[in-house]
Amino acid sequence: MPLKALALNCTLKVGRGAESSTDAMIAVLAEAFSQYDVTVSETVRVAALDIKPGVTSNEGDGDAWPGLREKILAHDILIFGGPIWMGQISSIAKRVLERMDAFLSETDDEGRMPSYGKVVVAAIVGNEDGAHFASAQLFQALNDVGWTIPAVAACYWVGEAMGSVDFKDLDETPEMVTKTAKMVAGNAAHLAGLLHSSPYPG
């Protein structure tokens, strides 16, 4: 059965038309996933949505999280993309993680959270050190709320410390980024396929 992936871009840039290095990294992963017959159906710019603060699956009138939550859970793989700011993953990414906290109390009869059997990978960009710390933040939180993390689950690029070059402005994608993206996509597709045919028992 064909696998589907959804990408979340947790850039701080609200405008959908504003250039984002996170979009550029997601595009590298989307190309890699296509080699494994995984379709990235959409990239959602989270900052453009009104995701209310909170830790439930519905925080009331105007909350855009219920719709995004439904979209996330309709896919086999989640590409969780975001930039590094002040050495950490963006506040938009943290808002998404906080809303997923509700999964802890939304288990089925076997104790499985809605995210069980779904795979997540990270796409991280920044102009300073911090990719390992950012992926550690993401993966610990996502694992706590039921996501499955494959081997080599993060594709990232960080520029020179104190530098001014963004990933989106590079003349070409570095070879190691392309190589890593292929490994991330291959491992995630393999794992998602296994979980699709043989779900966790709970």
Image (cartoon, rainbow, N blue to C red):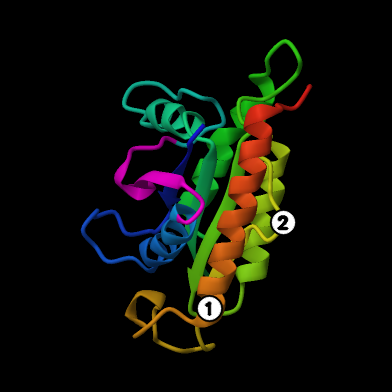
Identify the residue at horizontal 68%, vertical 37% (top origin).
Answer: 194
Q: Are marks 2 and 1 in contact (CB under 8 Å)?
A: no
Residue highlighted by disc 1: 158
Please give left or right for residue 41 compared with residue 53 in the image. Answer: left
**SS of the residue under disc 2:** loop
Q: In this rendering, is residue 135 above or below 102?
A: below
Estimate the x, y position of residue 78 in percent, counting from the top left: 52, 44
User: Which amino acid type is marked by label 2?
Assistant: Ala
Q: Is residue 119 magenta?
A: no
Q: In this rendering, is residue 59 above or below 17?
A: above
**Range shown magenta:** 35-52
Please give left or right for residue 124 compared with residue 166 in the image. Answer: right
The quarter of the picture where residue 98 lies is top right
Q: In this rendering, is residue 168 above or below 81?
A: below
Estimate the x, y position of residue 60 in percent, counting from the top left: 40, 21
User: Which amino acid type is marked by label 1?
Assistant: Val
